[in-house]
């Protein structure tokens, strides 16, 4: 392969693995990152940028032409609408990282055609916000309304990888100190039996890799996730087995104040919505559309136990 690829967010949970895979494939990779990294491969160039969403940087980087651009950055609705047309003009395929959080809780398993929260929610305060799940859905709408079809929408589920892990709405910042100290984390008891799908970042990267340079993927959307699911209670047990993480089930207010001591039930709406409109929804997925196009099989993906065990040394690093 000799395709030229731009990766925005190249050292994140999924970007790290995709950068490695495409460089190994022989692609000419421009990898944009906050970090200062020296490449040892002639076909891989790291570009350190403080703010890759800055209009000046976007104008500069889009002077180049790319066979594909994979965009792992997080935009608000306005900044995305201002940015993505520049990328569409300089590439044969723009891959937009949306999220399975866009979906409502109306179908199980969730397919690409399942209802989205943006389209069916009746929560007016939520709909008037630019919450993560909403600006991702609005980004999808903006691409569909564009005059071109040289884009592909990918929606990962909850993803973990090198130095990243998630348990309900708790991230590594909350989990790692308790893994080390032996003190229990607090988990929201009402979520105990809710199904969730957690996918290893390396597997998501492989799904995206196989969607690149495919004409049939243009103008399409794909759920790039494992179809395997576990309840949050089962996931907590997997964390206990691998990391020795102790936990206790508590009410919502106690949980949210463990997550953020400054939690305010009236104003901390982002934390409330992430729990209410994501982690408390049944998140089991039908990934058959992605499997058909990529040629992958469900058994190609790591189980949650395998993935967390693999990443354990990195998750526990300082």
Image (cartoon, rainbow, N blue to C red):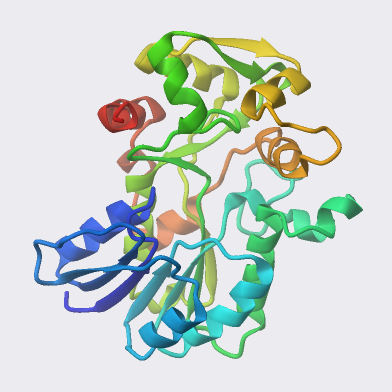
Image quadrant where one finds the N terminus: bottom left
Q: Position of residue 161 (x, y in %)?
A: 36, 40
Residue in view at x 50 percent, y 51 percent? 156
Q: Relative to residue 302, is residue 230 depicted above or below?
A: above
Q: Position of residue 92 (x, y in %)?
A: 39, 84
Taking depth in this image into account, of 78 and 91 the one nearest to the observer is 78
Image coordinates of residue 89 in percent, x first then y, are 46, 90
Can you say whether 205 is above or below 167 in the image?
below
Q: Residue at x 18, y 64 (%)?
A: 23
Q: Residue at x 82, y 41 (%)?
A: 267
Left or right for 265, reference 315: right
| Residue 65 rendering spot, x and y as whole percentages | 33, 88
Instruction: Note whether residue 306 is visible.
Output: yes
Q: Determine whether, in the image, residue 167 is placed left or right of residue 114.
A: left
**Which is nearer the eye, 38 or 187?**
38
Q: Quadrant of residue 9?
A: bottom left
Q: State whether residue 193 appears in this view.
A: no
The quarter in which the C terminus is drawn is top left
Numbered marks: total: 0
Q: Residue at x 40, y 65 (%)?
A: 50
């Amino acid at each position: 392969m000799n395709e030229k690829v731009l990766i925005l967010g190249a050292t994140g949970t999924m970007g790290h693995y995709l950068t490695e895979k495409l460089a190994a494939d022989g692609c000419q990779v421009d990898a944009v990152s906050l970090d200062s990294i020296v490449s040892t491969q002639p076909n891989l160039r790291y570009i350190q940028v403080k703010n890759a969403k800055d209009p000046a940087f976007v104008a500069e980087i889009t002077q180049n032409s790319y066979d594909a651009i994979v965009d792992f950055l997080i935009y608000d609705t306005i900044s995305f609408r201002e940015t993505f047309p520049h990328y569409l003009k300089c590439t044969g395929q723009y891959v937009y990282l949306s999220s399975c959080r866009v979906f409502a809780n109306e179908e199980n398993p969730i397919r690409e055609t399942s209802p989205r929260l943006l389209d069916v929610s009746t929560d007016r305060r939520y709909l008037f916000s630019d919450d993560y799940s909403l600006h991702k859905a609005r980004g999808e709408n903006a691409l569909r309304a564009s005059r071109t079809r040289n884009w592909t929408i990918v929606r990962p589920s909850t993803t973990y990888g090198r130095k990243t892990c998630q348990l309900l709405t708790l991230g590594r910042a909350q989990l790692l100190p308790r893994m080390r100290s032996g003190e229990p984390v607090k988990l929201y008891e009402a979520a105990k039996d809710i199904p969730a799908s957690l996918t290893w970042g390396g597997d998501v990267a492989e799904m995206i890799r196989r969607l690149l340079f495919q004409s049939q993927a243009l103008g399409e959307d794909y759920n790039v996730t494992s179809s395997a699911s576990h309840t949050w209670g089962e996931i907590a047990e997997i964390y206990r087995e691998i990391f020795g993480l102790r936990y206790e089930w508590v009410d919502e207010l106690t949980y949210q104040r463990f997550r953020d001591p400054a939690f305010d039930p009236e104003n901390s709406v982002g934390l409330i919505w992430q729990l209410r409109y994501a982690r408390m929804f049944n998140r089991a997925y039908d990934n058959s559309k992605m499997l058909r196009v990529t040629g992958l099989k469900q058994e190609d993906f790591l189980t949650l136990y395998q993935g967390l065990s693999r990443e354990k040394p990195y998750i526990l690093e300082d």
